[in-house]
Image: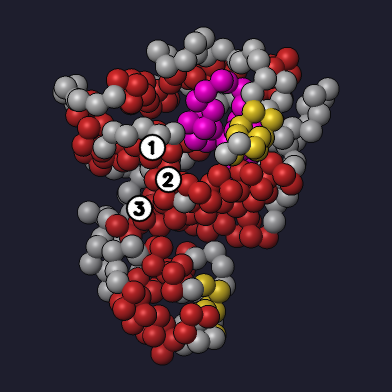
């Protein structure tokens, strides 16, 4: 929510200690990705991650096509499915294939991307809406978007903020994502445009984000995604949404770093987690979010190893158990495949 229609102002949000810790941790992990050359994936891995990105972003909007079907469309094979869903995928493939041609702070690029993304799906794609819209939750109006006659000014303000603000790009990209959702500049396609534009902003600074499917984390936490949007709408600032998106990016980078080497030792898993987790305290559930391939029993054994080696302190018991870091460890990085 940009608070003034009459002058260019920074959208309202707070840069909290938690947000700064996440920014620092993400920055460290980006360095680790580069150090292990995972920022230069093979063509096959790029295609696989692109499929995951498209599937997750469109599935949030109700698209029913599978990864195999999306892969077949990329390979120009015949696919049987709802025509609308197929058209959404064809458009998304085209947009992501042309991602490098768009300029994040340029309105003409913003409108052109929407036209490419929504062509054949809505009337007047690539044009700002001309009528009021509301977002319903059940039978109740959850959000009333700004009036149509303010949209041109609001988008100009938002892109000026993106271009001129000195805040970290991880923060700015999350703010822009939220504001696109809040302003609701188009009749349809606002959610996928918010996610696309954040990907674009980040990929200009860090090319690895062009192929990092952090949208899959958003899909896994879809209800939380909607809840945070609603919370920020009520509070009038995007602080909680920034934190949510940074956690999603943080976890997507963790997945990239850990899933490339499935046979990590206990010591490698523990050291990597403790070196990258942004908070001093954590739960077994937090640990398993990084290592989705391990069982709860394996996670418990890993954490017992950390306690026995005085890396963490166990606090509480049973369901209330938490762990507090005694010291940060240097990561034993997984090797690039």
Q: Measuring 42% from the left and 50% from the top, which residue is drawn there?
A: 220
Residue 288 picture location, percent across and down: 39, 67
Q: Measuring 54% from the left and 85% from the top, which residue is drawn there?
A: 315
Q: How far apart are marks 2 and 1 (CA)?
A: 8 Å
Q: Specify the segment rendered in magenta.
A: 170-198
Quarter of the figure that contains the N terminus: top right
Q: Distance between the residues labelled 2 and 3?
A: 17 Å
Which mark is drawn over residue 161?
A: none
**Label 1 SS:** helix
Q: Mark 2 points at which residue?
A: 219
User: Does 274 appear in magenta?
Assistant: no
Q: How many marks?
A: 3
Q: Which of 17 and 138 is in front in this view?
A: 138
User: Does 179 appear in magenta?
Assistant: yes
Q: Is tag 2's residue or tag 3's residue first in the polypeptide sequence?
A: 2
Q: Name the residue under label 1.
A: 59
Residue 132 picture location, percent across and down: 67, 20
- Can residue 284 be seen in the rendering of this structure? yes
Q: Mark 3 points at which residue?
A: 256
């Amino acid at each position: 929510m940009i608070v003034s229609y009459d002058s260019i102002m920074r959208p309202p949000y707070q840069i909290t200690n938690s947000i700064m810790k996440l920014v620092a941790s993400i920055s460290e992990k980006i360095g680790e990705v580069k150090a292990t050359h995972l920022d230069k994936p093979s063509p096959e891995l790029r295609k696989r991650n692109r499929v995951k990105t498209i599937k997750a972003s469109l599935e949030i909007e109700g698209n029913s096509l599978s990864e195999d079907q999306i892969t077949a469309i990329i390979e120009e094979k015949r696919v049987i499915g709802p025509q609308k869903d197929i058209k959404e995928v064809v458009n998304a493939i085209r947009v992501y294939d042309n991602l490098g041609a768009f300029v994040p702070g340029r309105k003409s690029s913003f409108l052109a991307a929407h036209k490419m993304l929504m062509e054949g799906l809505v009337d007047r794609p690539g044009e700002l809406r001309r009528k009021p819209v509301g977002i319903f939750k059940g039978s109740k109006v959850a959000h009333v978007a700004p009036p149509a006659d303010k949209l041109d000014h609001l988008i100009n303000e938002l892109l000026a903020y993106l271009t001129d603000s000195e805040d970290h790009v991880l923060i700015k990209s999350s703010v822009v994502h939220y504001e696109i959702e809040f302003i609701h500049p188009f009749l349809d396609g606002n959610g996928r445009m918010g996610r696309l534009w954040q990907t674009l902003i980040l990929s200009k600074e860090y090319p690895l984000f062009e192929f990092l499917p952090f949208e899959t984390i958003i899909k896994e936490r879809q209800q939380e995604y909607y809840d945070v949007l609603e919370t920020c709408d009520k509070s009038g600032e995007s602080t909680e949404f920034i934190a949510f998106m940074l956690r999603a990016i943080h976890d997507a980078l963790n997945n990239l770093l850990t899933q490339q080497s499935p046979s990590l030792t206990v010591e490698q898993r523990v050291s990597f987690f403790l070196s990258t987790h942004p908070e001093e305290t954590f739960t077994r559930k937090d640990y398993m979010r990084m290592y989705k391939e391990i069982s709860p029993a394996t996670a418990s054994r890993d954490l017992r190893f950390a306690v026995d080696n005085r890396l963490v302190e166990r606090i509480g018991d049973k369901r209330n158990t938490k762990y507090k870091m005694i010291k940060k460890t240097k990561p034993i990085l997984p090797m690039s495949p």
